[in-house]
Amino acid sequence: MKKAVIDFHHIKSPDEVYDCLGGKLDFPKYFGRNLDALYDVLTDICSETRIYISGRPDFEGGADLLHVLKDAERVNGSLSLNFVK
C-alpha cells in the first residue's frame, strides 16, 4: 500500500502538493502539474493508496484541489482520503 501525507499547516501552494504526492505516489514523469492531470493520475491508481490530510489549504485554488482529491476518491475504489487533526 502506498501512503502520502498532505500537511496543509506547512504546504502553501498547489505546486507543493504536486511535489508531495508525486514523490510519495510515484507519479509519471509526464505529470502535467495541474488539477486535471492530478485527477487523471489519482483515478488511474490501481493499488491500495491512502492520502492523509491534515489542516485545510490556505492558498488560492486550495478548495478546488480538495474537490479534485475528493472526486478522485469517489470514483477510484483503490484511493482513500483520511482527514486527521
Image (cartoon, rainbow, N blue to C red):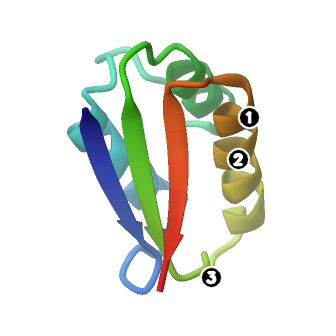
* Mark found first going from the N terminus, 3 or 1: 3
Q: Secondary structure at mark 2?
A: helix
Q: Using the rendered view, name the quadrant where residue 6 is placed.
A: bottom left
Q: Residues within 10 Å of mark 2 (few under 14, many from 20)?
A: some
Q: Residue at x 47, y 86 (%)?
A: 85
**To which residue does mark 3 refer?**
58
Q: Secondary structure at mark 1?
A: helix
Q: Nearer the viewer, mark 3 or mark 2?
A: 2
**To which residue does mark 1 refer?**
74
* Mark found first going from the N terminus, 3 or 2: 3
Residue 42 visible in rendering: yes
Q: Using the rendered view, name the quadrant where residue 39 is placed.
A: top right
Rendered location of residue 50, percent (x, y): 40, 45
Q: Residue at x 60, y 75 (%)?
A: 57
> Along the horizontal axis of the image, is 66 left or right of 30?
right
Please, what is the three-letter code of the amino acid marked with disc 2? Lys
Q: Point out the image quarter for the N terminus.
A: top left
Q: In the drawing, what numbered circle is on residue 43? A: none
Rendered location of residue 74, percent (x, y): 74, 34
> Along the horizontal axis of the image, is 55 left or right of 1?
right
Q: Residue at x 53, y 43 (%)?
A: 80
Please, what is the three-letter code of the amino acid marked with disc 3? Asp
Please, what is the three-letter code of the amino acid marked with disc 1? Arg
Rendered location of residue 38, percent (x, y): 56, 32
> Along the horizontal axis of the image, is 66 left or right of 15?
right
- Count of numbered circles in the view: 3
Check contact, mark 2 vs mark 1: CB within 8 A. yes
Spatial distance from mark 2 to mark 1, Cα to Cα?
A: 6 Å
**To which residue does mark 2 refer?**
70
Q: Is residue 71 above or below residue 28?
A: below
